[in-house]
Image (spheres, coloured by chain):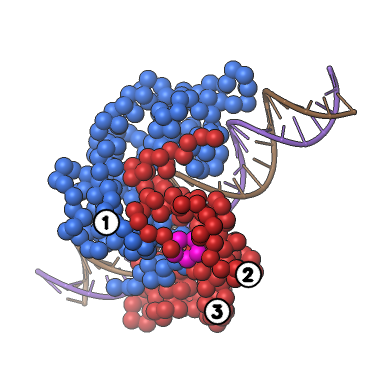
Chain colours: A blue, B red, C brown, D purple
Amino acid sequence: MVEDVVRTLGFLCLGSRLRRIGERLQADTQQVIDEAGVGIQAGQYPFLAAIDRAGPLTIGELAQAVGITQPGATRTIGQLLELGFVDMQPALDDQRRRLVSLSDKGQELVDHSKATIWPRVAAAVADLCGDLDGPILEQLAAIEDRLAALPLIRRSTVTGPHALSNAQ
Amino acid sequence: MVEDVVRTLGFLCLGSRLRRIGERLQADTQQVIDEAGVGIQAGQYPFLAAIDRAGPLTIGELAQAVGITQPGATRTIGQLLELGFVDMQPALDDQRRRLVSLSDKGQELVDHSKATIWPRVAAAVADLCGDLDGPILEQLAAIEDRLAALPLIRRSTVTGPHALSNAQ
DNA sequence: CGCAAATATATAACATGTTATATAACGTTC
DNA sequence: GAACGTTATATAACATGTTATATATTTGCG
């Protein structure tokens, strides 16, 4: 077995480490979404959630809301348009802006997700790290150890918290 | 100004959030590296560090050490070969394995980095989050706020900790 | 021994982020 | 009101991760 250098190097590799854990978490979240039979990608959800919360938004506002660059938002909104979850129309007062809104199908997806998938994901992630405390490097180590011990999807059921049964 | 949904949604979007902060941190780290005039990418460093710590490693061991998949390791090692920082040769006992070692140039880079760049990065990241404590969502919020207040590269000098001058 | 299964690496195809730049619409100034 | 700078979105090119699969060894077994 080889040493995990990214973990060993601590603050020096914190960027890599956060990204790595984030990617892992998002992939695991995707499993929960797929299990629920919803045909959407984890990374597309925040866009729908943003519109659901704030009402129709432009591409630029969506990029800001989700924290990515504008070309990234343009691409994801293109996918959601393709999938029929959102509609897009030029703003009345400014033809440069495109207002993106939830379609009926998109609103249904959001409503259904709010009732089922999102609470399940949030509960699983809370089970994973809701009780943690202390320096960030220690929390990240605990998260990695716990994910290795019991994947996120197994934490998304109704069997209650698993945190205490796992490594620090 | 638009609401940051990924932050608002908390545990539900923790994967996206970690990835986003990790990407940001790594991009900021790249600035510190570039400022030092070293022609290398932040994501390539962990591979060099792994070999420096453990001695020559195979592609598969490097993938494990750095925590990515084997094809990703193959690609990055290809780049480092191209740059002349590593050498690769088939293992004597098993022709399938390729042992990757630091070249003289690579060892020099590592030695130089250990003396200058790495301590600077580690200090900057420690300045950013070394004093944090408490629930992970709060720490992440503090990290984002602090990065917005003072970018990582401005924390990499000898002017001491800035944490207290910033939010949260 | 000889062949099938397993293992290590390489390659292809794709996902999703970025930066740089093109294009179209708006707004300001002389 | 025409020209020029600014802003919003789209597109291109690239970076770097992934999964699936091909290829070349090695290992194990009848």
Q: Which residue occupies 37% across, 40% down? A: B9
Amino acid found under the numbered disc labelled 3: Ala
Amino acid found under the numbered disc labelled 1: Leu
Q: Pointer 3 indicates a residue of which chain? A: B
Using a 10 Å C-alpha cutoff, classify the residue at mark 1 as few (fewer than 14 neighbours), some (14 to 19) or many (20 or more). many
Q: Which residue occupies 53% across, 24% down? A: A99
Q: Residue A144, image x and y in percent?
A: 30, 60
Q: Pointer 1 indicates a residue of which chain? A: A
- Are dots 2 and 1 on a single chain? no
Q: Which residue is mark 1?
A: A147
Q: Residue A111, image x and y in percent?
A: 31, 26
Residue B36: mark: 2
What secondary structure is marked by label 3? Answer: helix
Q: Which residue occupies 64% across, 69% down? A: B37
Residue B115: mark: 3
Q: Are marks 2 and 1 in contact (CB under 8 Å)?
A: no
Q: How far apart are labels 3 and 1 at the CA level?
A: 35 Å
Q: Is residue C16 left or right of residue B85?
A: left
Main SS of residues in magenta:
helix
What secondary structure is marked by label 1? Answer: helix
Q: How far apart are labels 3 and 2 at the CA level?
A: 12 Å
Q: Which residues are magenta?
A: B126-130
